[in-house]
Amino acid sequence: MPKSYIESQHYQSTNFTEQQLPLAEYEDCRFTNCNFAGTDLSEIAFVECSFEGCDLSNAKLKSTAFKTVRFKNCKLLGLQFDDCNPFLLEMSFEGCTLTYSVFYQLKLKGTRFKGCTLHEVDFSEADLSNAAFDGSDLLNAVFESTNLEAADLRTATNYHIDPEKNRLKKARFSSMGLAGLLMKYGIVID
């Protein structure tokens, strides 16, 4: 079924739980203070779009395309980003809550997480090379066979990353965060 094409629209304070967002390709669109919680965004393409102050918690993302999409101050609880269309997938996050979200096996090179809450997020087998986690809280986030080469975690907090199970070449950490790399060894750092 061919999709419609919507360009340069601004959606403000729209409740998409009451009226479904039409299946389309959205390019250069802005979504401000919109509610998408629990909605089905499957097969929709967002290209160079921004979401600010939106709630997308538990939305369905089967084959959803996020191409150069910016999320700012959004609630993104429990999202299965691994269901998204991986072709040209590119996102950035600022001030977002992504708790319980899944990025399993995604290529997220250079992705920026600035001031985000990433509690219990699954980054297993993801490529996060050159990613930045500026001021983000990674409490109980899962890093298993994750590529974190050249990633910047200097200002990230509460992470526990096993250096033997992840790729960390040239990753940047602060001396304050060393405990998160040594926890499995039972070493006490004061």
Image: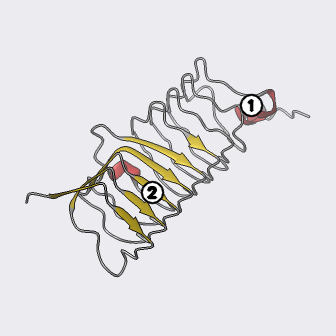
**Disc number for residue 182:** 1
Amino acid at dot 2: Phe
Q: How many marks?
A: 2
Mark 2: which secondary structure? Answer: strand
User: Which residue: 69% across, 39% down?
Assistant: 156
Q: Quadrant of residue 149?
A: top right
Quarter placement of the C terminus: top right
Residue that badge 2 annotates = 51
Question: In the rendered view of the protein, which quadrant contains the N terminus?
Answer: bottom left
Q: Position of residue 54 (x, y in %)?
A: 48, 64
Q: Position of residue 34 (x, y in %)?
A: 44, 69
- Tell me residue 157's x, y (percent): 72, 42
Disc 1 residue type (three-letter): Leu
Pointer 1 with pointer 2, Cβ within 8 A: no
Q: Nearer the viewer, mark 1 or mark 2?
A: 2
Residue in the foreground of this view, choosing between 7 and 119: 7
Is 69 drawn above or below residue 29 in the view shown?
Answer: above
